[in-house]
Amino acid sequence: MRKFEGDKLVIASHNAGKIHEIKVLLDPFGVEVLSAGDFNLTEPEETEDNFAGNARIKAHFAARSTGLPALSDDSGIIVDALDGAPGVYTADWAETPSGRDFPMAMTKVWTMLEDKKAPEPRTASFNATLCLAWPDGHDEIFTGKVAGRIVWPMRGELGFGFDPIFQPDGETVTFGEMDPGKKHGMSHRADAFAKLVAGCFA
């Protein structure tokens, strides 16, 4: 596994929340975190049907474009009774002409489960894949996962995306109801980051 030895890292994202989260995690390692926006990078088209493939597209595009190592993340929710959907298309399910509508997307998930008469518990998992890519084409991949179930109705205002219908195993609240600090400590992204840090930064 290749160690990260530079002092600058590009986050292949325009999402301010995600960039801040990564910046905090990498602070102890003295890494200057830059974003795709700092370089006016466009977002490459995600053409793969799996998280690792799309994470690779984004990370390698940013690394080639900037000449610096780049980190990307591709994540989504997998609902077992829906044959893994929405999966890599998690954000797409919320797209509307006027922006993303996650209550609509969550309603779609529940309606499909009802139509299939899917048995309880309606198991699901949040999945995150991180790709750290270097300008020479090398990369390292790290995956994280948190298992749980789909619940209805939507509960909680604290999360984002599909959080209000996802109740992690061993908990009585959804990610939408959970204290953000606790959620960040146990999330799919936290799991993947712990592996990234252990593999490339520790």
Image (cartoon, rainbow, N blue to C red):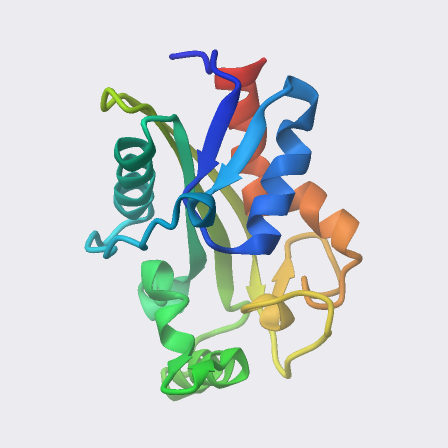
Q: If the image is split into quadrants, where does the C terminus sit?
A: top right
- Whole-percent x, y for residue 73 in the image: 43, 44
Instruction: Tell me if 110 is positioned left or right of 176 in this view.
Output: left
Q: Quadrant of residue 31?
A: top right
Give the residue displayed 42% in from the left and 46% down from the top: 36
Q: If the image is split into quadrants, where does the N terminus sit?
A: top left
Residue 187 vs 107, above or below: the answer is: above
Residue 193 vs 102, above or below: the answer is: above
- Whole-percent x, y for residue 101 in the image: 49, 82
- Whole-percent x, y for residue 194 in the image: 59, 29
How many badges with numbers are in the image? 0
Instruction: Tell me if 193 is positioned left or right of 54 in this view.
Output: right
Viewer-nearest residue: 117 or 18: 18
Viewer-nearest residue: 51 or 57: 57
Instruction: Tell me if 40 is positioned left or right of 32 in this view.
Output: left
Give the residue displayed 64% in from the left and 19% down from the top: 30
Viewer-nearest residue: 119 or 104: 104
Give the residue displayed 57% in from the left and 54% down from the top: 16
